[in-house]
Image: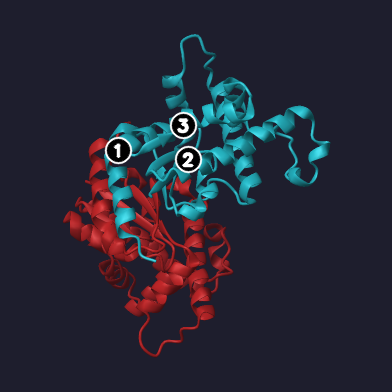
Chain colours: A cyan, B red
Amino acid sequence: MKIVTISREFGSGGRELGKRLAQELGWAYYDREIVTAIAENSSFAEDYVERVMEKGVHAGYPITVRRTLSAIPALQQNNLRVLVEQQKVIKSLAQRGENCVIVGRGADVLLREYEPLNLFVYASLESKLSRCRARAQAGEDLTDRVLERKIRQVDNSRAKYRQLLTGSPWGQKESYHLCVNTSGHDVKGLTSWMAGYVNYWFGGTQE
Amino acid sequence: MKIVTISREFGSGGRELGKRLAQELGWAYYDREIVTAIAENSSFAEDYVERVMEKGVHAGYPITVRRTLSAIPALQQNNLRVLVEQQKVIKSLAQRGENCVIVGRGADVLLREYEPLNLFVYASLESKLSRCRARAQAGEDLTDRVLERKIRQVDNSRAKYRQLLTGSPWGQKESYHLCVNTSGHDVKGLTSWMAGYVNYWFGGTQE
């Protein structure tokens, strides 16, 4: 089984790249069904699950959470439950044994035993702002300041989630096999070249 | 004109990748002739020039060098002269107008006006050690400790040189378009895929 994980900065186009890559490779792409499975397993509403997956545990959340569970306010306990459930769901998806692409959610760390190919997708702030603007729905508040804050917040919670999982920082190139800067690029154009890398990687790995 | 610059950690295989890439693309590869041109322009011996290019200015060298030139010991002044000459040579190579690959030497920064494609090549320490061992000549002192120190020293002087040129840190993914981890990989195998990326990049850039 071959697994590609994609970690990405918010607004870098990493999710789109993951979707297109899975399509190009003919592999499974796990995204929406992760949310659905978590909601089913935890009996939380899907939109709540999605919110936690985007925002992570509360910003002021202590890292020593496992040792001090009883002291955590109820909301944070629920958030944590979603994240724990997410880990189970991701592991069970891998156990299906299909070649797949998984975007975000710490899959690179959670699925380490399967030796996934781990990609990191990033971009300049300017490029991320312009991608967010293009993606926003009509009527959304779109000042650059608001978008910039959103980008920082989301990346921040991704970093915190990774720290919680591994104790190691998020987005450092050493943790990934390839880091792709999408600034000034169309993700669609990158896809077939990335698929070539995936094929090379799984064909040509030397240990 | 299209320029690819390759910055790399010592032992990551970046130089070999640069050579092979230039060959695959049919582009110029500037390496040994940089040393020769610097030696000619500065009247220093080629092996001295090479040593400075590898080790950089003296480790304790002050960053404010341009303002305090008179206070610098003679050796460091010579070292600095080599580095200044290097900058001139690299710029004059670019002025030839040929598509080319340049490895190291701050070319990504020096040639910014030509909008080069900037790659960074890195690897795990273990992988770098094993590449260094394979590359070492018979009779060289090869304990891992010695090699590890050498890797650290060379990378350190690269970082210092970049700091001198730009004031910005070396090896941070934000400064590059693509960062490639060669751990466990044969650089030869990577080449044709990298050439595809270069072609994609220069064909598909959107501004």
* Percent of width and height locating residue B134: 36, 77
Whether the residues at callouts 3 and 1 have beta carbons within 8 Å, the answer is: no
Q: Earlier in the sequence, mark 2 or mark 3?
A: 3
Distance of label 3 from label 1 (alpha carbons): 15 Å
Disc 2: which chain? A
**Badge 3 local density, few (<14 within 10 Å), some, or many (20+)?**
some
Q: Amino acid at mark 2?
A: Leu
Q: In terms of image quadrants, where is residue A204?
A: bottom left
- The residue positioned farthest toward the top in the image shown: A139
Whole-percent x, y for residue A31 in the image = 46, 31
Please tell me whether mark 2 or mark 3 is closer to you in this view: 2
Precedes in sequence: disc 2 or disc 1: 1
What kind of residue is marked 1?
A: Gly
CA distance for labels 2 and 1: 17 Å
Numbered disc 2: secondary structure: helix
- Drawn side of residue A110 relative to residue A6, left or right: right
Which chain letter matches label 1?
A
Q: Residues within 10 Å of mark 2 (few under 14, many from 20)?
A: some
Residue B177 occupies which quadrant of the picture?
top left
To which residue does mark 3 refer? Answer: A31
Viewer-closest of A33 and B63: A33
Label 2 vs label 1, nearer the camera = 2
Locate residue B68: give its quadrant: bottom right
